[in-house]
């Protein structure tokens, strides 16, 4: 079995919750044994050992006892060092076993009968092998699926040439080839053709929305989850399922409001985020205001792609487990959680550095476990309380003159003018490497995150 990947610094606690002070004191003695075995140290020499009663040599007796003791100490210390990895892997196996039972029992009935337990488990992350089944159940795919409608919609072609041109341009740029080696997210040619058909079919289904940049990332991620093997073309069933899950998110969960003309829901979420930022991180908001960093500079990118174009893909999968199961408003608390983690770094940056950082924070330290970062962000987001007044504003009819939606034109630059594509090869506009990716900053400020082993196991 291959060794487990290195854990982020945030998951390497100095005090293991299952180890008491006595064991930790014993571990320090074991560490001393290791140092003695490896070579001389600055520690004082050990006291003389009395000769054994049988008359054998004191030095040989001491050598045998010392060698045996040190070998045991080394073995024990190695076991202690590996225990976090072992515990993490055992926790993964327990989690998979729980989800296997839920799926076998019937995930839809489990959601109805035990919603609290389901949402609690979903917030800890859904195993990849069950993710598509669970997502379909969360959006009521089976109840809303209509047979043969998808293929009729694809057969209509793209009646609106503007949509057709935009889709053809955006589809190849959804998960660019330069990201493949780094993220494993490259779509095959067969995937790209499926993605094109899905976007065209939706534009024909709902011409009031049509197509807008950002939708390609959402539909593309659904295809990646429905058909994770990039070497196998999506089957007709997988492609059709991805389309209907996309429809469920857009039409039933309200995501279409992000892409309608004048972007009514995006405007409300932007205002809601700004209000929440003032409540949770007033000093960071003041710093952004002083530097001229408006929420629209980064929040449009985050929300139009639901973080897909902004964070490592494995982090996004974990965030989407919560978005799909809990609903769209959770993106507000996730955004605040992310800024809380990045706050120490952002407070030291000026305008140009902040803009550059937000553009390139998807790149960074690939050795860091992006999936665990997603779990930490989800846990931190659970501590962000969204006031009822903000939640109510998000569900008001679009034609209602709520203050948060009074002037959509004030949300400049307009979302349709935003360039959601990252510069190629993880470089900024000047061809420079990013100062640091979000994963690296998460590790550096891990002390800010309440991420003990006991919480992750819970």
Image (spheres, rainbow, N blue to C red):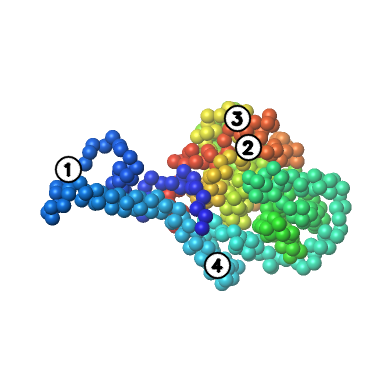
Q: Quadrant of residue 354?
A: top right
Residue 430 in which image quadrant = top right
**Category of crowding for the residue at label 4, using alpha-carbon neighbours closer than 10 angstroms: few (below 14), some (14–19), many (at least 20):** some
Per the image, the residue denoted by label 4 is: 100
List x then y, in percent, for residue 138. Answer: 62, 62
- Gap between marks 3 and 4 measured at Cα: 45 Å
- Is the C-beta separation of discs 1 and 2 under 8 Å? no
Q: Nearer the viewer, mark 3 or mark 4?
A: 4
Secondary element at tag 4 = helix
Q: Which numbered disc covers residue 48?
A: 1
User: Does the residue at mark 3 contact the one at mark 4 (Cβ under 8 Å)?
Assistant: no
Quadrant where the image shows the C terminus: bottom left
Q: SS of the residue at dot 3?
A: helix
Q: Which residue is mark 3?
A: 353
Q: Would you call the spot at circle 2 few (<14 residues within 10 Å), some (14-19), or many (20 or more)?
A: many
Verify CB contact (< 8 Å) between mark 3 and mark 2. Answer: no
User: In the image, which is nearer the foreground, mark 3 or mark 2?
Assistant: 2
Q: Secondary structure at mark 2?
A: helix
Label 2: which residue? 360
Cα distance in 3D space between marks 2 and 4 = 37 Å
Residue 248 drawn at (x, y percent): 70, 59
* Mark toward the start of the polypeptide (1 vs 2): 1
Whichever of labels 3 and 2 marks the residue nearer the N terminus, that label is: 3
* Circle 3 residues within 10 Å: few <14, some 14–19, many ≥20: some
Query: Closer to the camera, 452 or 300?
Result: 452
Query: At 33% across and 40% down in the image, what residue appears?
Result: 39
Give the residue at x 65% y 46%.
181
Q: Is residue 24 visible?
A: no
Disc nearer the start of the sequence (4/1): 1
Most foreground residue, 320 or 18: 18
Label 1 – label 2 distance at C-alpha: 61 Å
Q: Is residue 141 left or right of residue 109?
A: right
């Amino acid at each position: 079995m291959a060794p487990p990947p290195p854990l982020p610094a945030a998951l390497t606690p100095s005090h293991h919750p299952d180890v008491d002070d006595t064991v930790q004191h014993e571990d320090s003695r074991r560490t001393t044994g290791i140092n003695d075995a490896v070579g001389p140290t600055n520690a004082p020499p050990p006291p003389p050992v009395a000769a054994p009663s049988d008359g054998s040599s004191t030095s040989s007796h001491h050598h045998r006892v010392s060698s045996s003791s040190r070998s045991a100490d080394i073995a024990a210390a190695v076991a202690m060092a590996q225990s976090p990895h072992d515990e993490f892997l055992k926790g993964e196996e327990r989690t998979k076993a729980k989800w296997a039972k839920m799926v076998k029992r019937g995930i839809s009935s489990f959601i109805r009968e035990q919603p609290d337990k389901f949402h609690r488990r979903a917030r800890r992350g859904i195993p990849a092998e069950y993710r598509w089944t669970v997502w379909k159940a969360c959006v009521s795919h089976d109840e809303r699926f209509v047979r043969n409608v998808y293929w009729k919609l694809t057969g209509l072609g793209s009646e609106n040439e503007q949509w057709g041109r935009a889709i053809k341009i955006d589809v190849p740029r959804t998960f660019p080839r330069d990201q493949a080696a780094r993220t494993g997210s490259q779509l095959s040619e067969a995937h790209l053709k499926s993605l094109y058909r899905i976007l065209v079919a939706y534009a024909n289904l709902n011409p009031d929305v049509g197509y807008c940049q950002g939708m390609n990332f959402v539909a593309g991620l659904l295809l990646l989850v429905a058909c994770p093997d990039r070497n196998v073309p999506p089957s007709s069933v997988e492609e059709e399922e991805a389309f209907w899950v996309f429809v469920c998110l857009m039409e039933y969960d309200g995501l279409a409001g992000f892409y309608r003309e004048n972007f009514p829901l995006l405007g409300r979420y932007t205002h809601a985020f700004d209000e929440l930022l003032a409540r949770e991180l007033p000093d960071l908001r003041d710093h952004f205001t002083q530097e001229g960093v408006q929420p629209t500079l980064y929040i449009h990118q985050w929300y139009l792609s639901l973080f897909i174009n902004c964070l490592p893909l494995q982090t996004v999968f974990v965030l989407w487990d919560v978005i799909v199961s809990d609903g769209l408003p959770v993106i507000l608390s996730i955004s605040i959680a992310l800024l809380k983690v990045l706050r120490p770094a952002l407070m030291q940056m000026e305008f140009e550095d902040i803009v550059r950082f937000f553009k390139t924070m998807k790149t960074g330290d690939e050795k860091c476990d992006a999936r665990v970062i997603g779990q930490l962000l989800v846990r931190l987001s659970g501590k962000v309380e969204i006031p009822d007044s903000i939640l109510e504003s998000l569900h008001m009819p679009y034609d209602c003159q709520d203050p948060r939606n009074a002037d959509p034109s004030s949300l400049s630059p307009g979302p349709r003018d935003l360039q959601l594509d990252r510069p190629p090869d993880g470089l900024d506009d000047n061809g420079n490497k990013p100062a640091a990716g979000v994963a690296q900053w998460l590790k550096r400020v891990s002390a800010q995150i309440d991420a003990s082993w006991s919480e992750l196991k819970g």
